[in-house]
């Protein structure tokens, strides 16, 4: 059997924890000394991205790169995007390309080519399934061949999730459960050695009850969990979406990591080199705290379940 | 009041008809003499795109460029995408960037920057609203400032539309109507002089009854109508989605236009220059036929309604 990207991710989670560092990097997220010293903004962002990767590779499961931040900078921005991916691939670390693409037939196949190979090659992508399951089919074929994977938008953590995702269906369940159920049905045709399906779901941090229900209903699905930190959710909420071994999902933080240096006010007054080192200390410290926060929450959850089982 | 891109589109439809030519151009869609003579595949595609634009500018409402075909070719492909848009902008013609992006908050704002300005500037984009209306909000602000617009995925013409879009909601209506209703509620805050909202909807060619119901329910929404030709729908189906003056929507054809040259078998045996001219004759002829097919269907529809009204 092919060793899939998901199996590698599973092992990374086991070894390094659940943190997925998001490289949604904008120039204004960097400490001022780094911005001021930059002869080229693209180079400054690339240097920062590479430094964040170097500072966190042994404490993170994978990196999520949000393409919108790079698309916004036009062709040069996408060159920066390609270089960032290239650096992560060179270090043999895992990439989730947060592209949220969604189209059908030939067009979907072109998108799969774009993000599973070539300049923008990543291990995983995020996808939107609004158009229907035929919008995922070309990705599934490509993933079966390459061992790559995807996370399909299911239930996100923004307020607007109520508009469509959380609407109840006449046939029972909600729209996001309709998406989840279709993904679950797909699982048997593309599964990694670790037992999880190559096509997982994006599930944001949410209220305890809903999170527990989602984890229970979708045992086959690996989750990409946004909403930690900036969007309000914490380790406790994330832990509910993980499995009994604390695996089965990665928890993303982007701006909270990239801007972790703000905690140290002295960094703004430092020279370029010193500021970068200082910033990376804060970045690493944030990720360690986050990793431990999630691990601790998983252990609390497990011991509660044990006590519950003994009663 | 600002003259919006939608007002220009409305006037173009009035003057030149409803055809939206799709530039989903792949090298293999070109006649062999053009492929064989190409020293650079990107240049060959660019030349073909420009030739199609030149051959159709007085018989089309706008051009839809499907970014997936260019993303699939990596950085060079996106340079080709930018050059294609640049050529259309230079000719002061209208562009729908078929990007189907969908994300929230800061990320959505970055996407809006990416596709409403800079290298990838277009007049309209296509969007997915699965994440919720907060995923559209940054685009709406940007559109209010710039007079640009968007088409939000509502009810597409692929078979997979049944999976989620067409599911019935407990609260009444279908998922796609929930999307449409939210768009309708948005209309009053961003409307062009022509009366239509700057945020229209993607509505595929569909069965007569459903099409008539959709047009009636969403009087404020301008439609981008895919599914003509290759996907089975014809002028009759499209006409039902237009308004009483045959306006209120553009009908897209992509591969059917780009590959129209296949009708003339002799083209494959021609020299490069001759083949391009021959291909453009067929492209133009296809678009004229399509434009007239839609116009005729609108007239048939109107005369039926008149007879009905007199009874």
Image (cartoon, coloured by chain):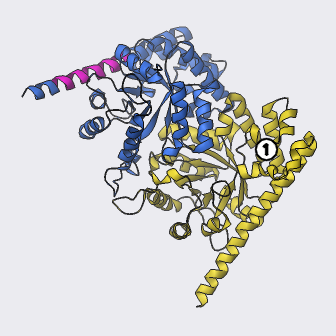
Chain colours: A blue, B yellow
Mark yes or no: residue A70 visible: no
Q: Is residue B59 above or below residue B30?
A: below
Would residue B140 be found to the left or right of residue A41 on screen? left
What is the quadrant of residue B80 in the picture? top right
Residue A21, horizontal then vertical, whole percent: 44, 22
Instruction: Kindly identify the residue that appears in the image at 61 percent across and 31 percent down.
Output: A113
Mark 1: few/some/many CA within 10 Å (<14, 14-19, 20+): many
Q: Is residue A279 above or below residue B14?
A: above
Q: Which chain carries label 1?
A: B
Most common secondary structure along the magenta stretch:
helix
Instruction: Kindly identify the residue that appears in the image at 51 percent across and 69 percent down.
Output: B213
In the picture, which quadrant includes the N terminus of chain A? Answer: top left
Residue B228, horizontal then vertical, whole percent: 66, 58
Mark yes or no: residue B168 visible: yes
Q: Which stretch appears magenta?
A: A286-304
Circle 1 residue: B49
In the picture, which quadrant includes the C terminus of chain A? Answer: top left
Residue B278, horizontal then vertical, whole percent: 89, 50
Q: In this view, does A107 lie above or below B93?
A: above
- B171 is within the stretch colored magenta: no
Instruction: Kindly identify the residue that appears in the image at 67 percent across and 18 percent down.
Output: A39
- A289 is within the stretch colored magenta: yes
Residue B17, horizontal then vertical, whole percent: 74, 64
What is the quadrant of residue A252 in the picture? top left
Q: Is mark 1 on a helix, strand or loop?
A: helix
Would residue A194 be found to the left or right of residue B275 on screen? left
Q: Nearer the viewer, residue A192 or A99?
A: A192
């Amino acid at each position: 059997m092919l060793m899939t990207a998901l199996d590698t991710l599973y092992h990374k989670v086991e070894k390094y924890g659940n943190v997925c560092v998001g490289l949604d990097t904008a120039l204004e997220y960097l400490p001022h000394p780094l911005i001021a010293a930059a002869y080229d903004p693209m180079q400054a962002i690339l240097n920062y991205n590479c430094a964040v990767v170097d500072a966190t590779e042994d404490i993170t499961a994978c990196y999520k790169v949000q393409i919108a931040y790079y698309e916004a900078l036009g062709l040069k921005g996408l060159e920066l995007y390609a270089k960032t991916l290239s650096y992560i691939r060179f270090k043999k670390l895992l990439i989730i390309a947060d592209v949220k693409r969604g189209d059908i037939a030939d067009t979907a196949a072109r998108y799969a080519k774009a993000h599973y190979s070539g300049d923008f090659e990543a291990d995983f992508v995020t996808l939107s399934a609004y158009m229907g399951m035929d919008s995922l089919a070309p990705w599934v074929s490509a993933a079966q061949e390459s061992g790559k994977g995807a996370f399909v938008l299911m239930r996100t953590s923004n307020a607007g999730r109520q508009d469509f995702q959380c609407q109840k269906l006449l046939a029972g369940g909600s729209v996001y459960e309709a998406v989840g159920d279709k993904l679950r049905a797909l699982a048997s045709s593309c599964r990694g050695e670790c037992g999880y399906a190559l096509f997982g779901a994006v599930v944001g941090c949410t209220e305890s009850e809903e999170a527990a229900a989602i984890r229970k209903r979708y045992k086959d699905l690996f989750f990409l969990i946004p909403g930690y930190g900036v969007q309000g959710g914490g380790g406790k909420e994330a832990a509910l979406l993980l499995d009994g071994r604390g695996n089965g999902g990665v928890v993303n933080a982007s701006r909270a990591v990239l801007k972790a240096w703000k905690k140290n006010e002295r960094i703004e007054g430092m020279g370029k080199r010193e500021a970068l080192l200082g910033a990376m200390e804060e970045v690493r410290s944030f990720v360690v705290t986050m990793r431990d926060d999630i691990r601790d929450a998983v252990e609390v959850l497990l011991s509660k379940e044990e006590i519950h089982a003994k009663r």
